[in-house]
Image (tube, rainbow, N blue to C red):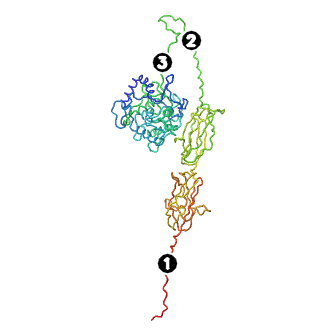
Amino acid sequence: MVAHFDRRLRKAAVTTTVAAVAVAALSASQAPDVTADGNGRQTTSDNVPTSDTPAADSATGNSPYYTDLPPLNSPSPAPTTGTPTSPGSSEAGIPATVLDAYKKAESELRRAKPGCNLPWQLLAAIGKVESGQARGGRVDANGTTIGRIIGPQLDGNGFALIKDTDNGVYDGNSSYDNAVGPMQFIPSTWAWAGRDGNGDGKEDPNNVYDAALAAGHYLCRYDWDLSVQADLHRAILSYNNSQDYLNTVLSWLEHYRKGTHEIPDGTGSLPVGRSDDPNAGASPSPGRTGANPGSRGPSTPSPSKPPASEKPTKPGSPSTKPPTDPAPPTETPTPTPTPTPTDTVHHLENAGTTGLTATAGDTFAKKISTRAETKAGDAVGKVRIRFTVLGDTDATFTGGEKVAAVTTNASGVAVAPALVAGEQTGAFTVRATVVGRTVPGLDYKATVTERVADTLTSTGTKELTCTPGGEFADQVEVKATLKGAVADKVAVTATLIKSDADPTENDKGPYFKDADGKAVRTLTGRQTDAEGLLRLPKLYADDTEGTYILRLTTPGGATLDITLKVAEPAEPTPDPSTDPSTAPSAQPSTEPTA
C-alpha cells in the first residue's frame, strides 16, 4: 500500500503542469449550468450563498478540500460488486463500506424527504473531495474510520476563524474548531446536523454511516430539490462556499453517475492535492490526518530585480555616481478594514411576531421574523440570522430540521421557515442569533396545544347491560369530529361517574381492568385513530345493581354519556299451558263411598 501511495506521489509531481491546466477545462465541461463571465470566471445561478456568508454557517467551516479531479475517461457502467481488474479501476471504485453508507443514506432520505431527490452519487462526490472516501476506505466493520480524520484548526491563519465550540470533544482542540470525519463537519454544525446512521445509538462524525446520513439531511434542508440544478448548486455551496469546490464536486458527481463499482475497504486511492496548498501537485500534500496537519507552507520568494536606474557597469570601470545611503524605510500604514454588515449589528428586534400557538401536528400560522439593527436602530441587510428550536419538543422547521439560517433583506428582516408542531404538547423556545457575531440572542416563546374535537358520537347503542359480577357483551366505540371533519389523534378521557349531577369518579358499579387485572374507573391516554374512531377496553360489573354513567370527554369540549345497567335478568312469565303448578287442583269427592 505504501509503495502504491509513493508511486502516486511521484506521478503527481511529474504531471503537475498538466493537472493545473486541465482543472478549469474539466470542471467547466462536467459542471452543468456553469457559465463564464467576461473575464473567464465561472458563475452560477443566483440565490446561492454569498461571498460574505460566514464560514461557521457551512457544514465544513469552508475548510480546505482535496482538488483531485476524476480521470478524463469516465468509466463505463460496471457492476457494483466484485474486485476491479482493469488498470486504474481504483480511481472509479468506491470502498465497499463507504459505498454502502452512501446508498443507505440515499434510501433513508428517499423515505424521510422524498422531495429532495438526493442521489448517493452526490454524497460520494463530496466524500471524495472532503476525505478521499474516508482515506481510501480505511474503516472498520462498523464504518468508523481507523484513526480520526481532522482538518486544520480554523484559527484565522489562512483559514476561517472559528473558536472552539465542542471543548475539544470531536477534534481534540479546545481553542479552535477543526473539521472532523469523512464528511468534514465542524463541531458546531455536527451538534445539530449529526445523525445515527448505523443504529448503534451514537452520532459519531468519524463513522461513515453517521456522517453520510448527516450530510444527506444537511443537503436536503430548506426544501431544496436536488434534481433542480439551481438547488443542487445552492446545497453544494452551503457545504463549502467556494466556486472551485462546486466545480470539483460537480465533476465527481458526473463521473460517478456514469458508473462506478465497489472495491475492497482500504484499497482506494489516496488524495494528493489540497486547496490550501500553494504548491498543490508539485509535492506531496499532507492528508487530513492528525490533530492539526498545519497551515499553509511558506512560499519561496522570487529573486528581486535591481532597480532600473542601477545599470551594471563593465568590470573595472568606475561608477558614474557615488553610492548614497539608502533612504530609511517608511512604514506602510495598515489599512482599516471595511466593516461587514455583520460587524455593524448591535442587537436584534422582534419584527412583529406574536401568538406562536399551533395544535399538535399542524403548521404554525405565523412565521418568526427578526430584524437586525445597528446601535442607532438602523436596519442591517445581508446578515445571516440563525434560528434554533430549543427545549423539550419535537417541533421543527419545515423540512424536519431544528436549525435554519436566513439572510436579512434590505429592511434588515429575516423570516424563519414555517414551524411545524409535533405531537408533543407544551411550550418551547426559538432563539434567533447573529451568525459570526456575539450579539445577545432573541427568544420567541411558542406553544403546542392538544388536538381537539367538538363532537363525540357513539357508533353503537347508548345503553349497555350486564348482570352483577359479569362482563358487558359490547365494547364502547365512539367517533370524534371537529367542525364535521374527522378528528384524529384526539385524546379521550373515559370516566365512570357517580351521577349526572356529581361527575366525580364512582367507587362501585362497572369498571375497566388495568394490566394487573385490577379495577379502574378512569381511562386516560387513549387517542382516536386516523378515522377518528376509538374503541374502549371491555367493561366489567361488580355485584352492585343499578344504572350508571360512562362519561367521555376530549380537549375542545366534546362530551358523550353512555348509560350502563347492571341488573339480574327479569324472571320469565310462566305459561299456564305448560306449568303444572298453575293447573286447576282436583277437588275432593263428596259422594259417599260404597
Residue 178 makes an appearance in the image? no
Q: Which residue is mark 3?
A: 302
Which residue is the extreme one toward the right? 376
C-alpha separation, residue under disc 1 versus residue under disc 3: 131 Å
Q: Hey, what amino acid is under mark 1?
A: Pro
In the rendered image, residue 294, in percent from the top left (x then y), is placed at 48, 29
Q: Note whether 209 is above or below 279 in the view shown.
A: below
Q: Is residue 77 left or right of residue 480?
A: left
Secondary structure under the numbered disc 1 in the rendered image? loop
Q: Hey, what amino acid is under mark 3?
A: Ser
Residue 576's mark? 1
Q: Give the mark nearest the N terminus, 2 or 3.
A: 3
Q: Residues within 10 Å of mark 3 (few under 14, many from 20)?
A: few
Secondary structure under the numbered disc 3 in the rendered image? loop
Q: Is residue 136 left or right of residue 319?
A: left
Q: Hey, what amino acid is under mark 2?
A: Asp
In the rendered image, residue 546, in percent from the top left (x then y), is placed at 56, 67
Q: Split into 4 quadrants, where in the image is the C terminus?
A: bottom left
Q: Which residue is mark 2?
A: 325
In this orientation, which residue lies closer to the viewer: 405 or 45? 45
Q: Is residue 325 left or right of residue 81?
A: right
Secondary structure under the numbered disc 2 in the rendered image? loop
Residue 114 makes an appearance in the image? yes
**Residue shown at the point (49%, 88%) measured from the top left:** 588
C-alpha separation, residue under disc 2 versus residue under disc 3: 25 Å
In the rendered image, residue 178, in percent from the top left (x then y), is placed at 50, 34
